[in-house]
Image: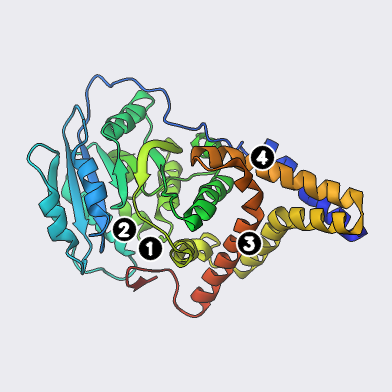
């Protein structure tokens, strides 16, 4: 029990550091900053890359076309060679009273580009130089009627070059309720929002589902071509803009929601595993360190608690229980944000074990040559 005690104490110390010294990653109060209407509303182009999205477009595209934006704005949907009639459906959803809609198709995908970024590049070029801002948003993201205006006001009020919101993902099925809040919690742990938003900090992140970027800042960062092969394109975009001297901001959304359903574990598994190993830069040492780290941080606390209680070793149980309590306590704000019951916080170790397996599976798929597979393409 002596070895387990030291491991449990180490886990507890890690959780004390995470809770107090890691950018307060667990707090969910990072929302759009105070904003005032600009004296002049800049022109905006909303670029939506879409590949086989006929299922979700009726739930998302109308919300973009219905934006109450005081300035000039248009929507450009880039149909990335879909096979399900995405382009035709998008064109049919256009309406005279909404924002102008353009549906276009990019040239064939060249080597070295991911499909989404090639589509984004095509949309950005079509937007033209008059678009001072570009809202890059996914085809499964629905926006409240004032979403665009609030994003632009936030960017203009403090000369921010990239304003991004983490969309609220769907949590209706049992697996969604178990895995989705943890997904956002883990993302915030990797990229604490407060650190990312600090101009001098090395941390930089964005959420690909909703990112408003100033055109001149994007060009200063090398344009979409600078990140053309990135699988995790949102974080790569934020790093490029910040490295070029841009000011970035990331927070949780209040009126930006994902409408894509993930009712089964297999669908959520693919969502995570397709990019998990890319996050580790395809490095076996980083993979090994991640597996050990996840085990120490998330699996040791409940294991030590149970083992200590069974063996009658109070110190082991106390150290494990304290670490588990800290873990659950930091997860509670995210559960409240997703309107989930507080007792679900105790299940975080189980959810973390699933993420550990997804990460390992991501590496295995990469070693088998399958890489990051998405919508019929493998990178």
Q: Are marks 1 and 2 in contact (CB under 8 Å)?
A: yes
Spot occupied by residue 293 in the image (x, y as percentages of width and height): 69, 58
The residues tagged by marks 1 and 3 sit, at their Cα atoms, a distance apart of: 30 Å
x and y percentages locating residue 67 in the rendered image: 22, 35
Relative placement, left or right, of 172 versus 140 is: right
Q: Which residue is mark 3?
A: 353
Q: Earlier in the sequence, mark 1 or mark 2?
A: 2
Q: What residue is shown at x 35% (from left), y 24% (from top)?
A: 157
Which numbered disc, 1 or 3, marks the residue that appears first in the sequence? Answer: 1
Question: Is disc 4 surrounded by few (<14), some (14 to 19) or many (20+) residues within 10 Å?
Answer: some
Q: Read off the residue under disc 2.
A: 117
- The residue at which mark 1 appears reads as 229
In the rendered image of this protein, does residue 123 appear above or below residue 64? below
- Give the number of the mark in front: 1 or 3: 3
Dot 2: what SS?
A: helix
Q: Which residue is mark 4?
A: 329
Q: CA distance from mark 1 to mark 4?
A: 38 Å
| Image spot of residue 42 (x, y percent) | 22, 30
**Earlier sequence position, callout 1 versus callout 4:** 1
């Amino acid at each position: 029990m002596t070895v387990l005690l030291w491991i449990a104490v180490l886990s507890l110390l890690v959780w004390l550091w995470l809770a107090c010294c890691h950018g307060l990653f667990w707090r969910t109060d990072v929302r759009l900053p105070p904003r005032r209407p600009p004296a002049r509303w800049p022109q905006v182009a909303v670029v939506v890359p879409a590949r086989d999205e006929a299922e979700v477009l009726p739930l998302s595209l109308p919300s973009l076309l219905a934006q109450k934006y005081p300035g000039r704005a248009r929507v450009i949907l880039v149909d990335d060679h879909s096979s399900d009639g995405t382009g035709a459906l998008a064109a049919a959803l256009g309406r005279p009273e909404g924002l102008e809609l353009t549906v276009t198709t990019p040239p064939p995908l060249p080597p070295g580009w991911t499909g989404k970024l090639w589509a984004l590049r095509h949309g950005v070029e079509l937007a033209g130089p008059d678009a001072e801002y570009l809202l890059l948003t996914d085809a499964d993201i629905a926006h409240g009627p004032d979403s665009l205006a609030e994003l632009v006001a936030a960017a203009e009020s403090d000369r921010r070059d990239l304003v991004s919101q983490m969309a609220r993902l769907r949590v209706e099925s049992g697996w969604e309720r178990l895995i989705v809040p943890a997904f956002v919690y883990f993302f915030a742990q990797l990229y604490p929002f407060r650190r990312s938003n600090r101009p001098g900090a090395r941390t930089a992140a964005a959420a690909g589902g909703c990112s408003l970027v100033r055109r001149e800042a994007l060009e200063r960062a090398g344009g979409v071509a600078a990140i053309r092969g990135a699988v995790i394109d949102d974080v790569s975009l934020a790093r490029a803009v910040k490295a070029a001297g841009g000011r970035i901001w990331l927070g949780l959304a209040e009126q930006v929601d994902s409408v894509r359903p993930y009712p089964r574990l297999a669908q959520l598994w693919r969502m995570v595993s397709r990019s998990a190993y890319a996050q580790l830069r395809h490095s076996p040492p980083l993979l090994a360190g991640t597996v050990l780290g996840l085990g120490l941080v998330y699996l040791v606390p409940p294991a030590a608690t149970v083992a200590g209680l069974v063996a009658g070793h109070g110190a082991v149980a106390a150290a494990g229980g304290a670490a588990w309590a800290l873990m659950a306590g930091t997860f509670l704000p995210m559960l409240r944000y997703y309107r989930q019951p507080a007792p679900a916080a105790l299940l975080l170790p189980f959810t973390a074990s699933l993420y550990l397996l997804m990460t390992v599976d991501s590496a295995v798929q990469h070693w088998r040559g399958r890489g990051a597979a998405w919508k019929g393409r493998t990178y």
